[in-house]
Image: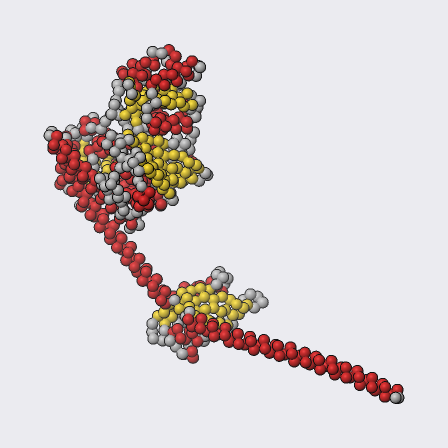
Amino acid sequence: MSEKLLKRIEELEKENKKLRLATQQWEHLQQVYQESNDRLEKMERDLSVTHEQTKHALFGGDLAWWNWNYLTGTIHFNENRARMLGYKVEELPETFTEVSRMIHPDDYVSTMARMDGHLSGKYPNYEAEFRLKTKGGVWKWFFDKGKIVETDIFGKPLRLAGVLIDIDVRKNIENELLLSRDQAVADNRAKSHFLAGISHEIYTPMAGVIGMADILKQSKLSQEQEEYLNVIVKSAGNLMSILNDIIEYSKIESGKLDFHEKPFSIHQVVEEVTASFVDKANEKGLEILSYQDPNIPVEVVGDPVRLRQVLKIFADNAIKFTDHGEIRIEAEFLAWDDETVKVRFNICDTGIGISDAGIKKLFTSYSKVESPESMKYSGGGLGLAIARRIIDRMNGRIAVESVPGAGTIFSFIVHFERYKDAEIADPMKEMLNGLKVLIIDEQQSRRSILRNYFERWDAEVDECANPADAVKMIHHQAQIKKAFNLVVVEYHLTGTDGLKFAASLKKDPLVQKSKLLLTTTRLFPVSTLELAAAGIQGVLIRPYTLSRLKNKIMEALTKVKKGASGLPDEVSLHVKDGQKRALKILLAEDNLINQKVALVTLEKMGHETDLAENGKIAVHMAEKKQYDLVLMDMFMPEMDGLEATQKIREMEALQPERHPAYICAITANTSPDDEAKCYQSGMNSYISKPFKLEELIKILNRI
């Protein structure tokens, strides 16, 4: 072959190779195209399915999407919007301005404000609830939600998108619930007014029954008559207790559980509650004991009225279900931080106890623990339910420990706000630090309470249960030159008494340096001469209260007599206590029976009493005559007791030389709110109907 032909063959082979390569590439492109086309067809099928699912979802969920071109103002919806409003698609407006005009006039301003807030960046999303009118003329509720989905380079909105949701059914249900709530509030308000009125109507005749029974008790009666009368008084008292619980629980159910927090003394509240149950405990032959942890600050911030109410409920319950033994009311310091003080309150008894099944029902409204042992005790079963509601509002918690036949302990823990202005060092720690103290008492619970007090004050404490062991311990300490600085001896000892024991110690030169403090109840008063003869430096009356204990220890150790608060040491309440001096008393009372009860009672005490049948007359009489005491009923015609008190105080303020009268409210309403109103109006104290003779005597003794 020629060279030219060979060259041509070579060129043809190169072209053939290129052609084969191009053919292979084309086949590959065809394969890629086919695969891409298959994927596209699958995506189209999937998109179609998704579209159908979305369409069904929007339809089933009563949703309509919208897309708003912010620059042109046009807004597009899917066909669901037309369906939800009853229009055809072509009948609906297509601009934002026209669409917004369909909003109910009462909802328009708030809706536009929400949209403007989103456009300005105030809200991350636009959300609004409004009504739109259907083609049939009915207003339907919708929830609209959307946001900016596209902006220009300067961040200004170009397009917004969102959904419109039909909430008409839900909104109608909400409105029905609101109407029901408003009706319930109105009904509760009406019920509260009714309870206030009916309580006055119930308490007024009950006050007459109990008051006249108290007067009758002062008459000469046969033993049989006295027994009958005691049944009347006890039954009336039980009825009043049940009525009080029903009315108080009804107020709580009506949402009237109000709290008024202020600085107050936990110690004072515990002492007051303890003192109020001494007589009731004595009637059943029970001993009532009290413990107030000295580490609890002098004052905390909280609601003393509510705390007192809870303690009284538990204490009353403890006495009711206890026939033998003792009741203890305790306040125990647990901890504190920069803001709060944690305190635990315990009310313990040695009563019938509660089973595990009974404990589960304890705090249920209108439920009583039924057992053979509890059937003989009266009560409405509301007290503990009330206590639980109050403690819940105090952010506290209740615990119950009980052994059937052995007793029960109710405990609750509360966090009070610290009141640092009242936090001072306890001088008792400095006085008793390192001193040797001996407690002689046969009853372990009383020894335990005294031990806790002295140990809190850093004293070294020993205790024993009988005089023989006490003598050995006293001699031993004296012989090792560490004599007891203070010996606390109980009056009631087996085979002897505290006075005789103290007198025997006085003769022993080894123990003459020890100070002696006698403990007893106010039912066994001792004379000053007997105390001096036995070498006793002071008498501590049970139940021990912190203020009284401090004062008596100081007296014994320093020989400086201090004034004590709380119960009088040796004075039993009796009518003659109110006869210290004749008082000029104004009784403002409109009920004839209550007038008779009060007038007869005060007359027997020797007081000069005038009667005012309403508040207006009471003010007029107080202007003309200076009274030592005004007993003011809160509910009277013409002018109630609150207004009358305010006017009397205004009159007294204009006469500085005039001594203000002591004004005591007498009312059937016993709620903390009513008590607060009394003090706000200018009253000095408050007792509830039907008042007991002892309560009236306490008021008279204050003047």
Q: Is residue 260 visible?
A: no
Q: Position of residue 353 (x, y in %)?
A: 30, 38
What is the image's colouring? secondary structure
Give the tally of numbered discs: 0
Query: For this view, does 51 lie left or right of residue 492?
Result: right
The quadrant holding residue 629 is top left
Q: Residue at x 42, y 36 (%)?
A: 334
Q: Position of residue 574 (x, y in %)?
A: 20, 28
Q: Is residue 409 above or below residue 1?
A: above
Quarter of the image with the N terminus is bottom right
Q: Residue at x 77, y 84 (%)?
A: 16
Asked whether 598 or 379 is in front, the reply is 379
Q: Is residue 639 above or below residue 605?
A: below
Q: Is residue 135 above or below residue 389?
A: below
Quarter of the image with the C terminus is top left
Query: For this view, does 282 lie left or right of residue 119?
Result: left
Q: Residue at x 14, y 35 (%)?
A: 229
Q: Residue furthest right?
A: 2
Q: Position of residue 108 (x, y in %)?
A: 40, 67
Q: Residue at x 28, y 31 (%)?
A: 325
Query: For this view, does 371 lie left or right of residue 334?
Result: left
The quadrant holding residue 248 is top left
The quadrant holding residue 18 is bottom right
Asked whether 318 or 520 is in front, the reply is 318
Q: Is residue 285 visible?
A: yes
Q: Position of residue 607 (x, y in %)?
A: 16, 30
Asked whether 536 or 688 is in front, the reply is 536
